[in-house]
Amino acid sequence: MAFLQLQGIGKIYVSEGNVAVGIRGVDLSFERGEFVAITGRSGSGKSTLLNVISGMDTYEEGELLIEGQPTSHYRQADWEIYREKYVSFVFQDYNIIDSYTVLENVELALLNIPDPRERRRRAIELIERVGLKAHLHHKGSKLSGGQKQRTVIARALAKDSPIILADEPTGNLDAETSREIIALLREVSRDKLLIVVTHNFEQVEEYATRHVRIFDGAVEADQIVAEPEPVAEEELPSPVPETKRKAVRSDRFGNGVLLGATIFKATPKLSAFLCFLLLVGTIAVSLVTSLTGSAWDLFDPHLMFRHIPGRAVVVTRTGDPVTGAEMNALAAEFGANKAVRYDYLYDQSYNFWDWDYDLDFDYVISENGTRTPKIGRAPETVTEAHLYLPISAAPLFGKKEIKDTTFTVQLASWDYTFSVDLTVTGVTYFYNNTKKAEVLLSDEGFRFLSACALLSSQSLSVRYELVDGTGEVLFTPTWSRDLIVTVDPDLPSGTMILPSPIVNTAHQIRAGAADPATVTERFTAIGTKYGSGSSVNWAYPLDGYRAVAGDGDRDGKLIVSPDLFTTVTEGVEDGLYKQVSLFFASDAAAKSAIEGINGKGYLAVLSSTTYSPDPSEIIVSTVLFVLSAAFWLFALLFFAFFVSLCCGRSIDAFRGDMSIMRSMGIPVRVIRIGMYVRMLLSLIPAYLLSGVAVFFIFRTPALNRLFRFPDPWQFVLITVGIVALALLSTRRQIRRLFKTSVKTALRGGDAA
Ligand code: ADP
Ligand code: MG
């Protein structure tokens, strides 16, 4: 049984309107240890013959037997196994990968050695053997023709395949180098079958054991010119059983990863460009996401109230206000932690902007609760505040020195603006721009500000009277019966300052009274509640409050202490404000309490209750969303276009290398994995750099202000999208790559 046997092999090339005979009726048998020289005129079919033997080209007629096994039924995968196991190829134009070093080129042929260190050791050994030790780390492109051919031979040795095929290996070399290469080929193939195609028989005459002449696709002559060296039987590898073949192959995932890393490293410019592209893409997509961020609000629930865990909102079914007494009774009965009579502020959102710092953010107002500020202390007095702000607001207060800074809250209604200067006692910055800023007050402060907010849409005045011991009114300012109220946060609790003309007159009357000791001041709060076309006046006695000395003439108003102001408002329970909030330990606790409260004739709901928005609102936000999504998709596609453009170029550059790899029998799967790995590796810098960018955006207020951050889930979406995009474009590349056969690609891509 011959080692390699060709029986009537024929190969016909059919192209458009043209049939060319490659080879026909070739009967040849080869044994290991032979050095076969094939000669013939150009176009006679030498290369075709070699390609058929190498399994890179198919044959249409006859049968090729390897170790007695027929191959005519082989499919691509079988030929891959065949090539990997049996054949090493040496071409005229040196099929080494130019971007790889000598070492990498040789290691590529050693993928079946799993241990990388062992692989390296063996590669270096082989490189030494072909005399290239000094060029270990030189790239293929930097080598001379002879050195390239030596590298190829080292690679052939690495594979240790029983057949070495060389198609005019010295065609591009000078005479001296040619001799060396032929000698080297002979030396390394003593126990192998070496077939060399040459048009210069003299060059190989010294070593050849057989001379086959091809003419017009057929064997013209076949002569034994020397006795081949016998190959010791034990040197022959035992034929590998068909089922075990897979096991000896280099078809492993790890090899794909290794290959990917090598490709990435070997083409630094391309890799850098790919990294850059992916980085730009990642940034662009993130930017678009952050610009179109508000469009996603479409999916936010439409809350009736601000949702605070454990908060329940209570109103009566009759439309009457829930009075303070009722509220306290409900709170006691259902175990609420806290009851808020005027919960108006919870559901308001205010806007802050500062020209100097180019700041513009929305905030809500709450009481401090249990939160402790990162900087400073919690608010204690009525007009102190702890600010919970986006980091972009940091320049406003600085990082440490917050003492004596103020924050002005403007509670505006359609006819009244109420400004309250709050002293900042603490600041906590947060790094997520999708969260809302908060002004956190003391409980007292919250009540005060609620009063301010409520009264900003009411009219509030206070009546002043001087009465004697019998209750008779001695004095009421006639020229201004009621005094418009304003607040001075520094006034002691329970006090007010009257305008000085009133104080002076009152003083005179008091002095002239029959019994001055019994003369007292009496204050009454007067309010007007407007509603549905009519207005209702209310009055509330402010017993126990007193006037103190001071310049009460500021704006001609009655100046009151904050607590008094709050009391005035809260005392007025009839018709001013209807709803109250009760706070429970959690939403779940609130839920069960709500059932009980509803059972008592009230209407109570969780603060997380949603409503369905107006149809027109839905239409507007849907249109906004569709536009944003289109913009987003456009950015992604634009990016995809660039990535595939770049990859397309890299494909053309890679096609030759890939053909070389395939001709060496590196499995398609390994190359595929390699390409995916290369793409993923290119993504790493993009993600590292965007990570750094995110960090700086978080940390730098100016940047933080500029970019609204995507929600975490949007960020995940971007990441997944870009990875998917990169993998998809790799898949496309691979498709394109493997469309052309190995042989065609090796010939430079001409499919003719
Ligand atoms: P050699 O290597 O001896 O110069 P080849 O084996 O390259 O000859 O070519 C043998 C014949 O087959 C030539 O007539 C050539 O034109 C033809 N041939 C080779 N490759 C192709 C191909 N891919 N398509 C069509 N004809 C081809
Ligand atoms: Mg040829």
Image (cartoon, rainbow, N blue to C red):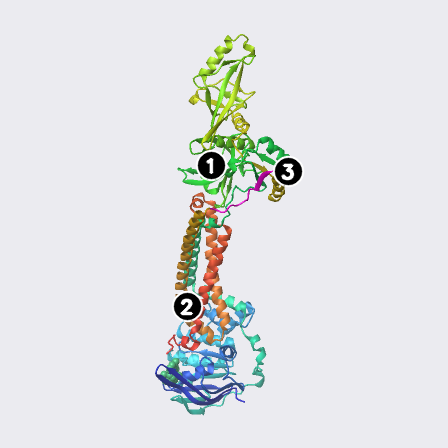
- Give the foreground label among 2 and 3: 3
Residue 36 visible here: yes
Marks 2,3: beta carbons within 8 A: no
Residue 603 within the magenta-colored segment of the rendering: yes
The magenta stretch spans which residues? 599-613
> Magenta stretch mostly in which secondary structure?
loop
89 left or right of 597 in image: left
Q: Which residue is mark 1?
A: 397
Marks 2,1: beta carbons within 8 A: no
Q: Is residue 502 above or below residue 352?
A: above
Locate residue 644, reporting x and y percent: 41, 64
**Gap in Å between the C-alphas at discs 2 and 1?**
55 Å
Q: Is residue 678 above or below residue 751?
A: above
- Give the foreground label among 1 and 3: 3
Q: Nearer the viewer, residue 482 or 321?
A: 321
Q: Residue furthest left?
A: 17
Which comes sooner in the sequence, label 1 or label 3? Answer: 3
Which comes sooner in the sequence, label 2 or label 3? Answer: 3
Which comes sooner in the sequence, label 2 or label 1? Answer: 1
Numbered mark located on residue 334 in the image: 3
Q: Residues within 10 Å of mark 2 (few under 14, many from 20)?
A: some
**Gap in Å between the C-alphas at discs 1 and 3?**
42 Å
Numbered mark located on residue 651 in the image: 2
Locate residue 117, reporting x and y percent: 55, 67
